[in-house]
Every structure is written in structure tokens, then in C-alpha cells.
Image (tube, rainbow, N blue to C red):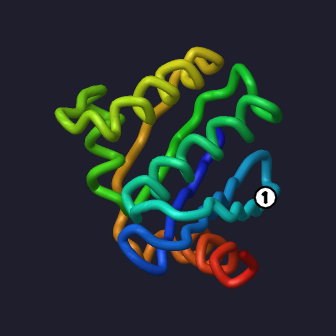
Amino acid sequence: MIEVYTDGASTGNPGRSGAGVFIKAYGETYEYLFSLGEMSNHEAEFHAVLKAMEICGDHFQGEIISLRSDSKLVADTIEKDYTKNNKFLPFLQKFREAANYFPHVFIKWIPEKQNTRADHLARKALRES
């Protein structure tokens, strides 16, 4: 199982945004950060998950993916496979497509204090943009 921690950060709402992805796989760790441009914090959180799925699709296709996010909104939307918010529906649809490359994809909400590496990467992406 591949453990994937994601986080999005924004300087405003909306504002300049970044995403961080921290992956644990086969005794190794991998770190990624992405500048995202102007968007809301919730959008940045969704982008972080989608970037993680893209990375896993490139490097861990066919593996079981365990996502962890400190965004309750993102975790609930993906876990329930439902959103009333039309702004978030495209993110959910992209997630569904990406999930097809894996036998199982799980998402779990975690407290911020358990997501420090992904948070650090997202904030670093903000500073570097």
C-alpha cells in the first residue's frame, strides 16, 4: 500500500496557492510541491489530491493507494463520492477518472498535526511562486 499525504495552502481566499504531496512507498519517501496560481484554499486542497493521483498514476499504477488529507471537505467529498457544490464537481470527476488506474483508493481525514510534511511542502510552494 502506498501512503500519500496531501495539502493545499492559499495566501487568501482566493489567493496565491500551492500544493504539497508527501508519499511513503517501499521504505522510501518522495516529496513534491506545486505552485497553483490564484484559487481558494478548498480548490488548492482538491488540486493537491489530483496532483498526488497523477504522480501515483505515473509511478505506482496498479497499487493500493491510501490518501490522507487534513481537509475534511475534500476527504468527505471523495469518500462519499458526492458534492452539492458545482464548483467542486469537476474535481470529483477528475478524481474518479484517476482512481480507475488503481484496484483501491482510500481517503482518510487526518488532523493537521499528522500532515506536517505535506503542509511544509504546500507552504514552500507558496514561497517559491
Residue at 34% across, 39% down? 88
Rendered position, 32 above or below 77: below
Q: Is residue 108 left or right of residue 2?
A: left
Rendered position, 57 above or below 25: above
The residue nearer to you, when weighing 60 against 58, is 58
Q: How many marks?
A: 1
Q: Is residue 99 left or right of residue 45?
A: right
Query: Residue extending furthest bottom?
Result: 127
Name the quadrant of the C terminus.
bottom right
Across and down, in percent, residue 96 comes to: 47, 22
Q: Is residue 8 left or right of residue 108?
A: right
The residue nearer to you, when weighing 24 against 80, is 80
Residue at 37% across, 57% down? 42
Q: Mark 1 = which residue?
A: 30
Across and down, in percent, residue 45 comes to: 46, 56
The residue nearer to you, when weighing 49 against 90, is 90
Residue at 72% across, 64% down? 33
Query: Residue extending furthest left?
Result: 84
Across and down, in percent, residue 79 comes to: 31, 34
Residue 100: quarter of image? top right
Rendered position, 7 above or below 101: below
Residue at 63% across, 37% down? 53
Across and down, in percent, residue 50 comes to: 57, 41
Secondary structure category for the residue under label 1: strand
Residue 16: quarter of image? bottom right
Amino acid residing under circle 1: Tyr
Disc 1: CA contacts within 10 A as few (<14), some (14-19) or many (>=20): few
Name the quadrant of the N terminus.
top right
Residue 102: quarter of image? top right
Q: Is residue 1 left or right of residue 27?
A: left
